[in-house]
Amino acid sequence: MAGKYTLTIIKPDAFGAGKAGRILAHLEQQGFALRAARVMRMSKGQAGEFYVVHRERPFYGELVEFMTSGPCMPMVLERAGAVAALREAIGATDPAEAAEGTVRKLYAESKGRNAIHASDSDENAEREARFFFAETDLLAGA
């Protein structure tokens, strides 16, 4: 899986605003192929476990509350160099600092309501994908 797959989540703000289709289309235009997807509403326990790496950060509680505030859409995407390519495609966490044409510049409301999550390393991409999907859920590339 390493290197060519990554996990992303269309967060509750963007999903609730009807932006999921536009975000997915934007990522497909950037060369990503959708390999798994689901719509769900995370429980506080799930969100807390998923974002456990941020537990000691001051924004952890707000992040858990936000991620459980409505439906979200976890997805596994495929592309060469997927992690770095996705992070470039989504832009800076703060949409005011994001480059033109990035997902966050186009669809995020604020630094806290920033539309999309992206794995930050191949190791985290694998861990995060397994959090939401079984190996049998992933569609093999063409």
Image (tube, rainbow, N blue to C red):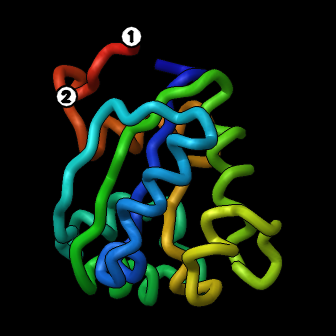
CA gap between label 2 and label 1 equals 15 Å
The residue beneath circle 2 is: 137
Q: Position of residue 67 (x, y in %)?
A: 34, 76
Q: Where is residue 99 in the image (x, y as percent from the top left)?
A: 82, 67
Q: Position of residue 127 (x, y in %)?
A: 41, 38
The residue beneath circle 1 is: 142
Crowd class of label 2 (few under 14; some 14 to 19; many from 20; radius 10 Å): few
Considering only vertical position in the picture, is 130 above or below 132? above
Instruction: Describe residue 48's horizontal placement relative to residue 63 as left or right.
Output: left
The answer to whether marks 2 and 1 mark residues whose Cβ atoms lie closer than 8 Å is: no
Which of the 4 quarters of the picture holds residue 20? Answer: bottom left
SS class of the residue under badge 2? helix
Q: Which of marks 2 and 1 is nearer the N terminus?
A: 2
Q: Nearer the viewer, mark 2 or mark 1?
A: 1
Q: Identify the amino acid type marked 2.
A: Asp
Task: Tell me the residue at 53%/68% (across/down).
Answer: 54
Query: In terms of depth relative to the viewer, which is nearer, 30 or 1?
Result: 30
Instruction: Describe residue 90's horizontal placement relative to residue 73 as left or right.
Output: right
Q: Identify the amino acid type marked 1.
A: Ala
